[in-house]
Image: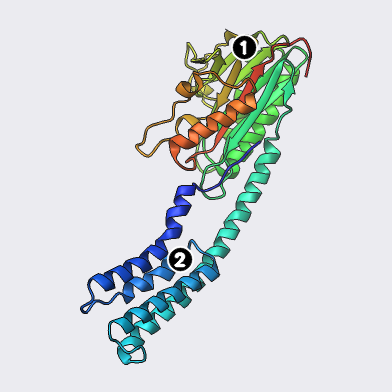
Amino acid sequence: MTRDRTPPAGQRRWSSFLPAAVVLAAIVIDVLIPLGTNVFPLLAAAPVLASPVYSLAGTIATGVAALAAGTVLAHLGGTDPVSTAYAVPFTSLTVLTVLAALLNRTMAHDRQQLKDARDVAEAVQRAVLPTPPKRIGPLDVAVRYRAAAREAAIGGDLYAIRPTPHSVRLLIADVRGKGLQAVRTVNGLLGTFHEATARLPDLPDVVDWLEERAQEIKAEEVGGVESFVTAVVVDVPADGSALRVVNLGHPAPLLLHRGRARPLDPAVPALPLGLGDLGPVRAPVERHPLPPGATLLLFTDGVVEARDRRGVFYDPVPFLSRPLPAEPDAILDALLADLARHTGGPLDDDAALVAVTRRQDTSGGG
C-alpha cells in the first residue's frame, strides 16, 4: 500500500528562490535608483524568508550574503561602512539574521514533531488496513492509500477483501470525520465485515450486520456528533463471472473493460451506514457481469472531490476510458498520476482505492 505526502515540486522550487530574488531585487533597485535609496529593509527580509525553507546554515548564509550586498552597495554609494549612518542598518540586519536562525530552529523542531506524529498515524493506519495478497480467488488485487496534506490526522477511509468458500467479498467505505473516533469506527466496521463475511452466506445479511454495528457505534459516541459511513459492498462468485453490489451512499464503482469505464450507479439510492433508522428499506443488491480481463475500481470521495486550481472536480471516467494496462497495480498508478496532474499538488482529503481484475484464466484459486 503506497502513501504519498511529498510536497509538490513547484511549490518547493519557487519558495526556495524567493530569498535570493529579494537580495537581487535590492541590488537592482539600488543601482537603478541610487539617490537616497535605502534598500536595507529589503535586504533584511531575505534571512527571514529563508528561515522556513532553508537549513540553519542556509539561513545564516542568506543573512551573510545580504550583509555583504548591503556593505558593497553602501560603499558604491559613497557611505563609509564604519560610519554611524551604516551602523544602524548593519546592526538591524545582523539582529534579524540571528532571529531568523532561531526561527529556523524552532520551525525545524515543529516540523520534526509533526513528521513523528504523521509517522505514528500512518503506522496505525497500516495496522488497521494491511496490504492484501496480490491474488485472491479469481481476482488480481491492488490497493492504494493517499493521505491528505494536513496535520497528523488519521483518516476514516477503509477497505477490506475477504475470500469465502464460495466467493470473494470486498468493502470500501468512508467514515464521516477524522481522528480517534474515525479509527474506532473503522476498526468496528472492519471487524464486523470479516466476522459477517465468514458467517453469513447472503450479502444483504452482511450489510445488515454492518448497519447494526454502525448504529451501535453511533449510540456510543459523545459530544453530540453523529457519524455515518458511505460504503460499497461487493460479492464476486468463485468463478469471477459476476458482481453483486450494494451501494450505500458511496461514489459509484467503475467497471473497466475494453477501453471503456462504466459507472455502476445504483438504480435505487440507499442511505449510508448509520442512518438506517431514517429509512428502514433494505438496500438492493444489483448484479453486473464481470468479463474476463475486466477491472472493478472502487474508491472513496477523496478521488472525485479533488479539485484543480479552478475548482473543477476530478472525473476519472475520461482518463480510464482508454486502453489501459491489464494489471490493477498499473491501472492505479496511472490513475493517481493523472489525479496528481489534475490537482497540481497534494490532496485535500484522504483517498483509498481498490482495483480487482478478473484473470483470463479463473480456474485456480488464490
Label 2: few (<14), some (14–19) or many (≥20) C-alpha neighbours in 10 Å? many
Q: Give the answer, above or below, for where 62 lies relative to 180.
A: below
Q: Give the left or right position of residue 278, taking residue 185 as reference.
A: left
Q: Position of residue 122 (x, y in %)?
A: 64, 45
Q: Residue at 57% of width from left, 49% of height from top?
A: 152
Q: Residue at 44% of width from left, 26% of height from top?
A: 315
**Residue underneath mark 1:** 243
Which image quadrant for residue 244? top right
Q: Position of residue 347 (x, y in %)?
A: 49, 40
Q: Position of residue 272 (x, y in %)?
A: 52, 24
Front in this rendered view, residue 191 or 262: 262
The quadrant of the picture occupied by the N terminus is top right
Front in this rendered view, residue 134 or 120: 134
**Residue underneath mark 2:** 50
Q: Amino acid at mark 1?
A: Leu
Q: Position of residue 210 (x, y in %)?
A: 63, 24
Q: Residue at 65% of width from left, 18% of height from top?
A: 357
Q: Give the left or right position of residue 200, taking residue 5 as reference.
A: right
